[in-house]
Amino acid sequence: MPYDFILNVFLLIGGIALLIRSGLWAVGALTKLSQFLGVSEYSVSFILMAFATTLPEFFVGLSAASGGKPLLSLGNVFGSNIVNLGLILGLIVLASGGIKIKDAAARSDSWIIFALAALPAVLMLDLKLSRLEGFLLITAFFAYLGHLLRLKDVLEGKAKAFRLNGAVSVRVFFAQFGLFVVSAALLLLAAFLTIKGAKGISAALGASELIIGLFLLAIGTSLPEFFFGLRAALHHHEGLSVGNLLGAAVLNSTWVLGVTAVIAPIKMADGQAFLISAVAMVLLIFLVNLFVRTRLAISRGEGLVLLAIYAVFFAASLF
């Protein structure tokens, strides 16, 4: 086996391992920072946890676009959404015996979330994602963030927490913010190693960058969502789990892919691979939001449906 191939495998594995570890550190830091925000559990998870757990995808997107390989980011984004809402959410539902969501925002905003997460698939029907369309995705992300966050309430809640807890809270806040900054720097390094390894492997195997992104990168960068979501569901904080996964889908589709396209516009050559991944992603996003909207719950049977869709997508992509 060629030395370069083995080196690229180690770079990929090491990069993904560092992505997972630094992503978990970032999650821990933002979890503690969330005590200063006056928002619901679902909203906290949708904003803070989803932001933290999609940092690997974001930095992978930055590295891929800067290196002239934006298709890796596209595959990673679509693949991560499919893994999160098919494989990961399906496994979490089965392991926890079904999950219930108590926050009404999950129901009232379900179709907005669906539209945002599915938007890049619509924009790419011509197999291109231009800089202008990238700006559109970023604008859509900030518009919904403003709606969900309700900045005035958040700032009032933060001020109240600082007044109640005093200087200790201030020290804790800045300590955790420092940990988050360090974690983000490590994520950037991990993304660079992961991209370098993935590019080398795709070249050696003759596999397309989209396929590498859909599977190798997507599963690797989605592990933080899995560990956090499973822990939250098993401890009866289902709103955190679902909020994280739906928030990650929106962030991936708008913020991550939007920034990638602004840096390096995306052009697809393999229309079949794009169609398979786009259909699977949109179908999973639709079903999850449908399950949440109708009963604010996802049963074991519905979890099996999500897993079955992922299995069909996996088989269709390979064969």
Image (spheres, rainbow, N blue to C red):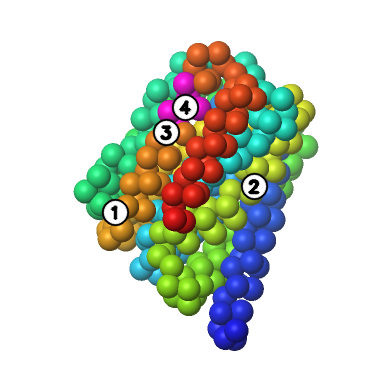
* Residue annotated with mark 1: 271
Label pair 1/2, CB-CB below 8 angstroms: no
**Which disc number belongs to residue 185?**
none
Label pair 4/3, CB-CB below 8 angstroms: yes
* Residue annotated with mark 4: 287
Label located before the other in sequence (3 or 1): 1
Height in image: 150 above or below 81? above
Residue type highlighted by circle 4: Leu
| Label 2 SS | helix
Label located before the other in sequence (2 or 4): 2
**Point 46% across, 70% down: residue:** 202
Q: Position of residue 138 (x, y in %)?
A: 35, 42
Closer to viewer: mark 2 or mark 4: 4
Q: CA distance from mark 4 to mark 3?
A: 6 Å
Residue type highlighted by circle 1: Gly
Q: CA distance from mark 3 to mark 1?
A: 18 Å
Height in image: 119 above or below 224? above
* Residue annotated with mark 2: 224
Magenta extent = 285-290
* Residue annotated with mark 3: 283
Question: Please, what is the dominant secondary structure of the magenta stretch?
Answer: helix
Q: Position of residue 275 (x, y in %)?
A: 33, 47
Residue type highlighted by circle 2: Pro
Classed neighbour count for the residue bearing mark 4: other residues with Cα under 10 Å, few (<14), some (14–19), many (≥20): some
User: Which residue is nearer to you in this view: 274 or 191?
Assistant: 274
Q: CA distance from mark 1 to mark 2?
A: 30 Å
Residue type highlighted by circle 3: Leu
**Point 40% across, 53% down: residue:** 74
